[in-house]
Amino acid sequence: MTSEKVSKLLDDIQLLHPTFYTLVVAVREIIFDLDPLVTEEVKYGGILFSKGTAFGGIFCYAKHVSMEFSSGATLADDYQQLQGSGKFRRHIKLRTCDDIHSTHLTEYISLALAQATDHR
């Protein structure tokens, strides 16, 4: 069940940037299809997803939506899609719904979710 804070953030995104709203909803759907027991909360200006431990979040910026992976530096990057050079996090930038498929986002989310579940 979506919390009031998440619903409010989604309403704001829909009002300000309908294309990004479609992306955020699609990513949330992927996550909850993979595991309906994932929890979500509004944090750091986006939606943070957890399964025992935080594994990622989705954030809207001026020109893209970013799926951030909390421990992305340790994820297998078979498709060379992960961006960033920090010690822990990596991200995938999305501009259209086609990017969800072309970046293999579902596979990366699945890996991050499995990693979070293993570390509980």
Image (cartoon, grey):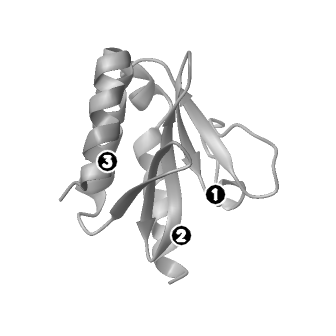
Circle 3 residue: 6
Q: Residue at x 65, y 61 (%)?
A: 71
Label drawn at residue 75? 1
Of tags 1 and 3, which is closer to the observer? 3
Q: Position of residue 61 (x, y in %)?
A: 56, 25
Q: Position of residue 36 (x, y in %)?
A: 23, 63
Q: Which amino acid, mark 2? A: Gln
Secondary structure, mark 2, is: helix
Q: Nearer the viewer, residue 21 or 91?
A: 21
Q: Nearer the viewer, residue 94 or 60?
A: 60
Q: Residue at x 50, y 84 (%)?
A: 120
Judge from the rendering whether residue 85 lies leftward or rightward of residue 25; answer left or right: right
Q: Position of residue 73 (x, y in %)?
A: 72, 55
Looking at marks 2 and 3 on the same chain, the residue that comes earlier in the sequence is marked by 3
Residue 69, compared with residue 98, is above or below; it is: below
Whether label 1 touches label 2, CB < 8 Å: yes
Circle 2 residue: 115
Residue 75, compared with residue 52, is above or below; it is: above
